Amino acid sequence: MLAFFNASGSTSNRKSLSTIGDISQTTKWLVSKRYIQAAIIVTLMTLAIAVPLFTRAFALSDVGNAGVFELDGNIVKDATTALPTDWGNGPGGTGLFSSTGTTNPLPLGGLDAHWVNDGPHSVSDTTTYTTGSKDTLDISANWACTPSNNITPKDDILHAYSFAIVPQSGSRTGHLLVYGGFERFANNGAGDLGLWLLQDPTVSCSSSKGAVSFTGVHVVGDILAVGEFSTGGSVTTLNLFEWVGVSKANPLGLMNITATGGADCTVAPVTANVCARSNTGPISTPWSTQDKTSAPNTLATAEFFEVGIDLTGLLGQNAPCINRFIFDTRTSPSLTATLMDYAEGALATCPTATISTNVSPSPIPFGGSATDTATVTLTTASTVSGTVTFNVYGPFSSPPTSASCTSSSLVTPFSPNTVSIGPGASPQMATSGPFTPSATGYYAWTATYNPSGPRNGNTVSTGCGDANETLLVLSIPKITAFDFTNTPTNDDPTLGSGTVVYTFKIHNYGAPVTLSGSLTVSGTANSIACTGGNSLALQGSLPAGMDATFSLTCTYSGASGQNVQATINAMFTDVNSITHTVSGSPTTYIFTIQTS
């Protein structure tokens, strides 16, 4: 029996029609039960409303909520901001690809993006697997392709696309994120697929007739994603594997690296490094597409799949340099499943570096110094970081060629000269230390970029004899004096006649040289006659630090307004048999005759 208590704590048997305390005990129990049931119903209804809200609150809009890509189960860009982006142009603006599949300018941090046409279903497909091709087998020795006119509709790929980015902000700043997506012809069955991220850029196969072996090989570190999505569009399984090579301990050649977490982005935790989406209803495509049952440019439920993978989150700084992607359809999510159709394309996650250089100044006089400046440029908007190593070879008697730079011609101790470059956005420049040659002649420079890691590009070098990489070092004979004496007019060579003696001096500031050239006297005067002829040949050796003096005596006569001129054309040949002009040459001295 239930006892009800009043406010004072004592039991009461008073009856009243105005309060629940006056109802019979049975009635009170029934009413209380109804209150409890109502409260439960209200609670359940509240939870029914709240649970979807909680699910959406914790669902991922991007792998790890990186905020750079719309993993939302459709193809077009919805966000009006630059990021997140999506595969195609949409109400939010420009996506990764135009309506014809050409790549649009990539957003900030974007490394590469590619769109592949593998349809339509009505034509022969030149990229389907032959029987026996398995994900667990190495490529060139075991994979083969063949053309097909009757691919199972649910396994026929129409288009495939890929995208790689390193976010510059947000929760996954600095991580390497890779996204892939594909369309299939029909949804009459669960979708089973694989996505290979391959390091060998030569992996490929296409056949218009008969079986053809794939080119390329697996490289340790290749990544395989294997997934399955239902006919309703939910991703039911998603696993990641790393190629480690076939061995007795691992006969399948693959190691599972899947982290815990939901396969479908709608239920994956924010810590997930991989998640995927399929379309749970019809969607439109921004490019020409035709599935089995829909109107043109429309995909039915579960005919589209996209996946995001944080390779840095999975593998840290050991993420491989991807150069190729292959989407395939398969008979099941098993590693040993039979492979059906595939679509392949390029995807470069590590930038390619180029290097250009410029030696300055060149030529230089013997005793002078020069530096080499290297500019490193990456093919994607990535960070240049590492070192540049400069080497100098020579001296050579003629401009160097590609074969000139050998260990015996390496100039030490200057070489190697290694300096830091970056870190900073591409391009970046680095300048060598000053190089002061100990001999005249030609010198060849080379420069090598050594990246800090694969995300900073590849090792790349200039070649011996490349443009702008040759330094010429000159001896520096120089005209230091040019004078004359004139008689009998107190050294005033402007009167109508006289005798003039021209004298000039060449000083050698460098290595020994041999002089050549001439001192020539001419003009419009009525007569000009020099001892030994009006041209004096310049010849003889000039040791380092010494002077060479040349003199020519001439008589002249003429009328007012006529002139007499002396011109020096001096050349020198250095120890490397290279001939150059003496500094200060050519030079000419002219005087005009005045008779009054």
Image (cartoon, rainbow, N blue to C red):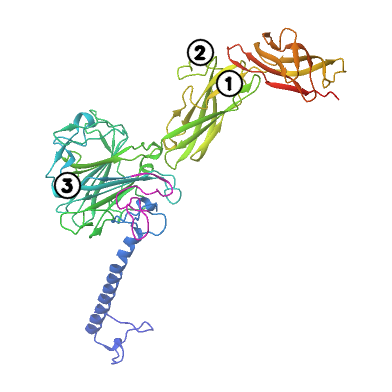
| Precedes in sequence: disc 3 or disc 1 | 3
Q: Provide the major secondary structure of the magenta segment.
A: loop
Say whether residue 509 is left or right of residue 106.
right
**Residue stretch rendered in magenta on the structure:** 85-113
- Name the residue nearer the viewer: 26 or 76: 76
For label 1, the residue is 472
Quarter of the image with the N terminus is bottom left
The numbered dot on residue 155 is 3
Q: Which residue is mark 2?
A: 408
Q: Is residue 283 visible?
A: yes
Q: Does the magenta run of residues contain 248?
A: no
Picture coordinates of residue 209 (x, y %)?
A: 14, 35
Q: Amino acid at mark 1?
A: Leu
Say which mark, if any, is on residue 316.
none
Tell me, yes or no, if residue 584 can be seen here.
no
Q: If you read the primary sequence from the N terminus, does the residue marked by circle 1 or circle 2 appear first?
A: 2
- Residue 324 position within the rendered picture, expressed as x and y whole percent measured from the top left: 30, 38
User: Front-most of 425 and 540?
Assistant: 540
In terms of secondary structure, where does tag 3 sit? helix
Which quadrant would residue 82 be assigned to in this image?
bottom left
